[in-house]
Image: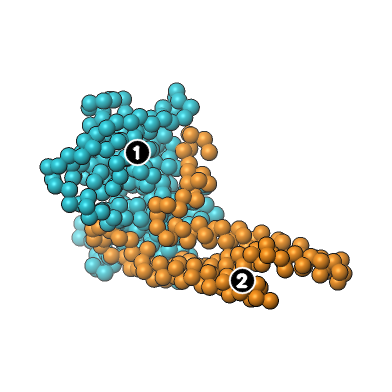
Chain colours: A cyan, B orange
Amino acid sequence: MAQVSSIPEEQASLPLSASKSILLRISKFNPEYDKSSKFMEFTITYKKWTTVLEAILDVKKHFDHSVAVRYSCRQASCGSCGMLINGKPRLACFTKISELDSDVVTVEPMNNFPIIRDLTVRFEKLFESHQKIKPYLIRNDTELESDEREFLQSPKELEQYIQFANCIKCGLCNSACPTMATDSSFVGPQALAQAYRYVADSRDKGKDTRLNIVDDSHGIWRCHFAGSCSQVCPKGVDPAMGIQFLRGYLLGFRS
Amino acid sequence: MTKDENRGGIKGMVNPRRYGIERIAYLLMRFSGLGLLGYFIAHVYETSNILRGRMGWDEFLALTQTTEGHIFLALVIGMCVFHTGNGIRIMLGHGGVGVGKPARPDYPYDPASQNYRHKIGIYSSILLAAVAMMYGLAVMFGE
């Protein structure tokens, strides 16, 4: 993950107790009243492990409680706090200010998602695309008739998809995708990677169904392998890899 | 793009700054593709000048013998070589070749699909395009 691996050494060596300050610029926009977004600026002190989310919550607590931000777990598990941090989609709870190597931290709502208010965006389209690829095991014998059967799987078979099962649906990949920026009908890297997750699952029998769904002019063929989705994924899902493998099935390279 | 959609639009698509060499390659591929399409249309127009007879043909061809014409043709050579080299890399990638293998990800989660093979492919395409352009310029200006 690029944002973590690029921690500058001098910042990483900041003593735990030392406090520094940054200028936090928060995008404010309410679609009901505002014509365009504007930035509010706050000076925030931070320590080595202070995250961007903590800084935003600090602003809410001490300066402006009206800042709209969605968050929940604070440990990169729920996928709620995705936003553009210094122009790149990241999870606010998983991004330390010290690793940004900047005295100014600008936070904006994620691209390619409608804004609810300030830093919060709508995920309906993301979930709709996710549902479209049938994100569940498809089998002829879905209803188990007895409790003696298990869907056995070898560790090797598990490795084929387990990486893609880490997706937390935070939407960072869709925000970074250059195709999503211009094509409102594109299904997006998140859904395509999840399509591969189920196609590669040895227990699943819905490969043809899913391949038919993604084999669309706004489906898998709109991916041009820019790879930005994989670079911003906070869980190491690597959607670009999954999409190319999925395309390999359609092109006959994989079976 | 309306604020309702909040799409990055062309600006969001072009943004080459924060996503590494792969995004720059994506951008160069787009530009070179559009450039070659433009050249193809211009080339059809150029060759249609043969209908104007030898004089008309020579007259139009003389445009390519100017300094600007040489630079234009050098750019076409560069676009052609980069688009070919990078296109082969992308086609292989689209088939799942050289994009790594699925595995349990380990922190800090460097994406396997953005591996050194593809980076070498991108840098090689850029280098080959630069060499081809320099060779083309040397031939054209060396006349």
The residue that appears at 42% across and 52% down in the rendered structure is B17
Q: Observer-nearest residue: A175 or A103?
A: A103
Q: In which quarter of the view is residue A166 placed?
A: bottom left
Look at the numbered disc 1 and give the secondary structure of its residue. strand
Q: Where is residue A58 in the image (x, y as percent from the top left)?
A: 23, 32
Residue B102 position (above or below residue A129): below
Question: What residue lies at 31% left-to-right and 55% top-to-bottom?
Answer: A2
> In terms of depth relative to the viewer, which is nearer, A201 or B68?
B68
**Left of A18 or right of it: where is B47?**
right
Q: Quadrant of residue A122?
A: top left
Q: Can residue A146 be seen in this view?
A: no
Badge 2 sits on which subunit? B
A225 lies left or right of A198: right
Q: How crowded is mark 1: few (under 14 residues within 10 Å), some or many (20 or more)?
A: many
Looking at the image, residue B8 sits to the left or right of residue B38; the answer is: left
Disc 2 or disc 1, which is closer to the eye? 2
> Which residue was labeled with disc 1?
A107
Q: Tell whether A99 sits left or right of A172.
A: left
> Along the line of sight, which residue is nearer the eye, A37 or B55?
B55
For mark 2, give the secondary structure. helix
Q: How many marks?
A: 2
- The answer to whether residue A60 of the structure is visible from this angle is yes
Q: Check disc 2 and give the amino acid type.
A: Leu
Tag on residue B137? 2
User: Can you name the residue that lies furthest to the front here?
Assistant: B142
Q: Which amino acid does label 1 sit on?
A: Val
Q: Residue at x 82, y 68 (%)?
A: B57
